[in-house]
Amino acid sequence: MGAEHPLFILYTSGSTGKPKGVQHSTGGYLLWAKVTMDWTFDAKPDDVFWCTADIGWITGHTYVCYGPLAAGITQVVFEGIPTFPHAGRFWEMIERHKVTTFYTAPTAIRSLIKAADSDEKVHPKNWDKSSLRILGSVGEPINPEAWMWYYRHVGEERCPIVDTFWQTETGGHVITPLPGATPLVPGSCTLPLPGITAAIVDESGNDMPNGSGGILVIKKPWPSMIRTIWNDPSASRRATSRGTQGLLPRR
């Protein structure tokens, strides 16, 4: 099978426009899933990795299905909600399965903060989380207050948080801290990964000065970038016509 053979088509959520059928390739997508497991999560053979995402989203594809299997590590596969049968379920499962890497969404974290504030019995302090070594955030911006709670009460101020920026079109992480290498900034995804040439431009594609707002773009290709939009190849060509590989909103 050729490296550019289509692997899957996954539709975007449509939150910023009409849903797009994103087509990924076999070789490039799998390569990026594997290297980002190594870079972002510092994957080790004895890790127990848990990404709480639904398999139907790109997070579930890359970091439940393809990435952990390519890395050859043990993982927890989860279906349900974090508050049933009680709001300490996540922490209970971390203790039971000795999870080393925990990857979840800010919405879940904020709901568990609220639950812990209203009922001390479900606070993460009631479970043994000493197996954890890396925490992750995915799917939306994490506000600094939630980041600090996550760092203090789940990671016990010893686990780095990798706040990952990416989307269906990128196939895997493109901007994220690297544990032990990148200074952590609560609420910030920090720096691009190796090979990701990110920039902020105006509507005409001109680079903006540091500290200015604009459109986030990636100027050069990377292995897991979208190959085409299903049934709309002209949109794919338009996205690259100004020398960028797709215009990406901040989140």
Image (cartoon, rainbow, N blue to C red):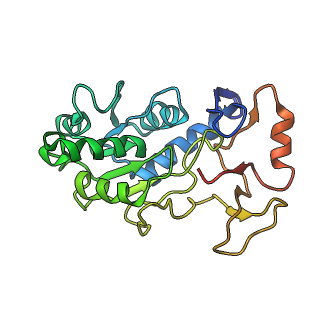
Coordinates of residue 174 in the picture (x, y in percent): 58, 53
Task: Reply above or below: 200 against 123.
Answer: below
Coordinates of residue 111 in the picture (x, y in percent): 34, 41
| Residue at image point 37% right, 40% down | 108
| Residue at image point 34% right, 47% down | 44
Q: Quadrant of residue 29?
A: top right
Q: Quadrant of residue 9?
A: top right
| Residue at image point 67% right, 44% down | 225
Q: Residue furthest front?
A: 118
Q: Nearer the viewer, residue 241 or 30?
A: 241
Task: Reply above or below: 144 against 165.
Answer: below
Q: Nearer the viewer, residue 40 or 163?
A: 163
Q: Is residue 147 left or right of residue 241?
A: left
Coordinates of residue 204 in the picture (x, y in percent): 85, 61
| Residue at image point 31% right, 33% down | 82
Coordinates of residue 46 in the picture (x, y in percent): 28, 43
Q: Nearer the viewer, residue 137 or 15?
A: 15
Q: Is residue 204 left or right of residue 197?
A: right
Please indicate, yes or no, whether residue 154 appears anywhere in the rendered image.
yes
Quadrant in the picture for the N terminus:
top right
Q: Nearer the viewer, residue 69 or 153?
A: 153
Please indicate, yes or no, whether residue 105 appears anywhere in the rendered image.
no
